[in-house]
Image: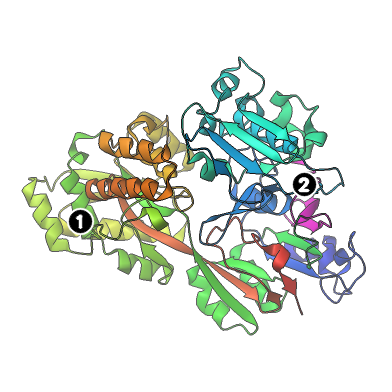
């Protein structure tokens, strides 16, 4: 009954149209307009602000309605979007210069200039806007003053002319490009009069972000039913071919069923649904590796968890390939360091499944088999729940008494604040685009809550290599330093690396031009190149 009522109030569920119902008429034309229906894995938080805390479903929407200086392709490489090319970095590493494409306009027809970029980056650097990214700009001239409330704007963000945006740094920070180049640009002419301390609650971001530079324009959010977007005729790469998109926050089983009936065109599926989807006619499967990974932190504040041999033994004791096959149908890769792509050397210890080696290490350190170690995690995701049970079984098999502890998000936060946990199972992050992102989860200065280092591991040589790499403009030399840091991390095992999961997409063969992306928040990275031929 609920689904039936939703369909009655949803214009795209009226089958009077050849390709999606009366909702296809919109601003784009008649009933023959093409309409794409895509699965949204959760209802959005309804705050489409680049400054807001990260929310995956909202990010999907923002990737369609906003644009950025740089984008990230399925190989997690930066490429130019609003910029003409990757930025220029001065020889001393203190100036980053972006050149913008000429003649671009916002979706409402107003001209786009470098002043919009300066305006947006100032919002991102100011904590009063609700921004969660202010720490990234600590090396920008004038940014610490804005963060402290002693200045209104960042003097290091400038627009020398309408198509040039510059960032001045107090010290070299090459990683800033990868960490901030994909910030979504918002319209100064719409938001200039909004007080900064009201920016995170302004109606534009919470109800109608209908002016942007992205390939689509926000039309409507029918709560818990769909988000409706229509193509942007002013998009930088030309008007998209697909006229409109409906993002539908339904459960995964409903999405999979609707894929089979033709009511859904694009769905992110779990490995458990793969066999069902493969049996459907006219459905294609595509995958892409994620940018982060699933792991367990090991709290080195606890004396009995400080010996590196214990953590090495844990890695040898776990059959990670079995875990990948059992929980993810083989759609993942084992991980042996936090680094990815060119920052990952090929001579790391792979910690292949070897329970005898695990027992040898435990014997060397005189491990007490009666010592209980508790693994805490938030249940509900099938692969992580399976990972926890496999860890329990296989660690106990070699003499490490692991006890499982399912907790709610609030409980885990309290445990983190109190540093009372032994191990936590979690995942995420993007370490594929910018290697310096690894600093935030491993550095001596980023122990939680100052950063994301939940293991409280500290290696000063590692930190020095990371900082030196981030200050090195020469790319080959920079990546050599990252590889040196990766070898240290791999040897000292600050966390128990598990796997990097693939994102699995199922889509109708009527979609042409779709290129699977491992970033599940950005399946539409090249949507302007898609067509829908039913």
What residue lies at 63% left-to-right and 23% top-to-bottom? 155
Residue position marked by numbered label 2 in the rendering: 212
Q: Is residue 493 above or below residue 15?
A: above
In the rendered structure, which disc, 2 or 1, sits on the residue that comes first in sequence?
2
Query: Which part of the image, by quadrant, shows the N terminus?
Result: bottom right
Q: Is residue 236 above or below residue 424?
A: below
Q: Camera-side residue: 234 or 378?
A: 234
Q: Is residue 255 above or below residue 489?
A: below
Looking at the rendered structure, which numbered label has been put on residue 13? none
| The magenta segment | 206-235
Residue at far front of view: 91
Q: What residue sits 56% from the left and 75% below the top?
A: 285
Of badges 2 and 1, nearer the viewer stands: 2
Tell me: 284 left or right of 221: left
In the image, 72 versus 103, the foreground residue is 103
Mark carried by residue 396: 1
Kindly state the secondary structure of the residue where label 2 is placed: loop
Q: How many marks?
A: 2
* Residue at x 42% of width, y 45% of height: 474
Q: Where residue 69 appears, x then y in whole percent? A: 65, 46
Where is residue 383 shown, x and y percent of the image? 42, 61
Label 2 packing within 10 angstroms: few (<14), some (14-19), many (20+): many
Q: CA distance from mark 2 to mark 1?
A: 54 Å
Q: Is residue 450 left or right of residue 306?
A: right
> Can residue 300 be seen in this snapshot?
no
User: Which quarter of the picture shows residue 236?
Assistant: bottom right
Q: Is residue 180 left or right of residue 245?
A: left
Q: Position of residue 24 (x, y in %)?
A: 86, 66
């Amino acid at each position: 009954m609920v689904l039936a009522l939703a369909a009655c109030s949803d214009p795209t569920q009226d089958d009077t149209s050849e390709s999606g119902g009366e909702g296809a008429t919109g601003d784009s034309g008649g009933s023959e307009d093409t309409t794409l229906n895509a699965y949204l894995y959760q209802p959005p938080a309804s705050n489409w602000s680049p400054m807001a805390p990260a929310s995956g479903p909202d990010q999907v929407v923002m990737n369609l309605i906003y644009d950025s200086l740089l984008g990230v392709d399925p190989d997690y490489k930066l490429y130019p979007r609003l910029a003409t090319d990757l930025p220029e970095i001065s020889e001393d590493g203190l100036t980053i210069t972006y050149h913008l494409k000429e003649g671009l306009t916002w979706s409402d027809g107003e001209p786009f200039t470098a002043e919009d970029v300066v305006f947006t980056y100032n919002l991102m650097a100011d904590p009063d806007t609700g921004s969660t990214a202010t720490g990234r700009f600590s090396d920008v001239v004038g940014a610490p003053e804005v963060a402290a409330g002693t200045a209104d704007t960042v003097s290091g963000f400038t627009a020398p002319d309408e198509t040039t945006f510059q960032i001045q740094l107090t010290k070299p920070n090459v990683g800033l490009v990868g960490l901030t180049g994909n910030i979504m640009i918002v319209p100064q002419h719409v938001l200039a009069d909004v007080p900064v301390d009201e920016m995170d609650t302004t109606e534009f971001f919470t109800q109608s972000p209908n002016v942007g530079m992205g390939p689509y324009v926000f039309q409507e959010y029918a709560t818990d039913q769909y988000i409706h977007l229509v193509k942007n005729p002013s998009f930088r790469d030309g008007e998209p071919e697909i006229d409109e998109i409906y993002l539908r926050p339904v459960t995964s089983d409903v999405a999979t069923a609707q894929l089979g009936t033709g009511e859904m065109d694009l769905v992110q599926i779990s490995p458990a649904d793969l066999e069902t989807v493969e049996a459907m006619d006219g459905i294609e499967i595509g995958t892409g590796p994620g940018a982060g990974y699933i792991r367990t932190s090991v709290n080195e504040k606890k004396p009995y968890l400080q010996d590196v041999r214990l953590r090495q033994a844990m890695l040898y004791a776990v059959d990670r390939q079995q875990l990948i096959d059992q929980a993810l149908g083989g759609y993942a890769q084992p991980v042996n360091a936090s680094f990815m792509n060119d920052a990952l050397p090929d001579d790391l210890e792979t910690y292949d499944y070897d329970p005898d080696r695990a027992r040898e290490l435990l014997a060397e350190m005189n491990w007490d088999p009666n010592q209980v170690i508790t693994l805490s995690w938030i249940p509900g995701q099938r692969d992580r729940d399976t990972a926890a049970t496999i860890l329990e079984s296989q660690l106990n098999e070699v003499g490490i008494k692991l006890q499982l502890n399912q907790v709610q998000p609030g409980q885990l936060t309290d445990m983190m604040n109190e540093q009372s946990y032994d191990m936590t199972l979690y995942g995420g992050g993007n370490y594929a685009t910018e290697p310096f992102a690894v600093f935030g989860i491993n550095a001596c200065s980023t122990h939680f809550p100052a950063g994301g280092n939940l293991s409280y591991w500290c290696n000063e040589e590692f930190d020095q290599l990371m900082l030196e790499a981030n200050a090195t403009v020469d790319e080959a030399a920079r990546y050599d330093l990252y590889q040196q840091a990766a070898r240290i991390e791999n040897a000292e095992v600050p966390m128990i690396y598990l796997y990097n999961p693939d994102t699995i997409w199922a889509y109708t063969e009527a979609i042409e031009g779709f290129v699977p992306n491992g970033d599940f928040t950005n399946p539409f990275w090249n949507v302007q190149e898609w067509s829908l031929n039913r």
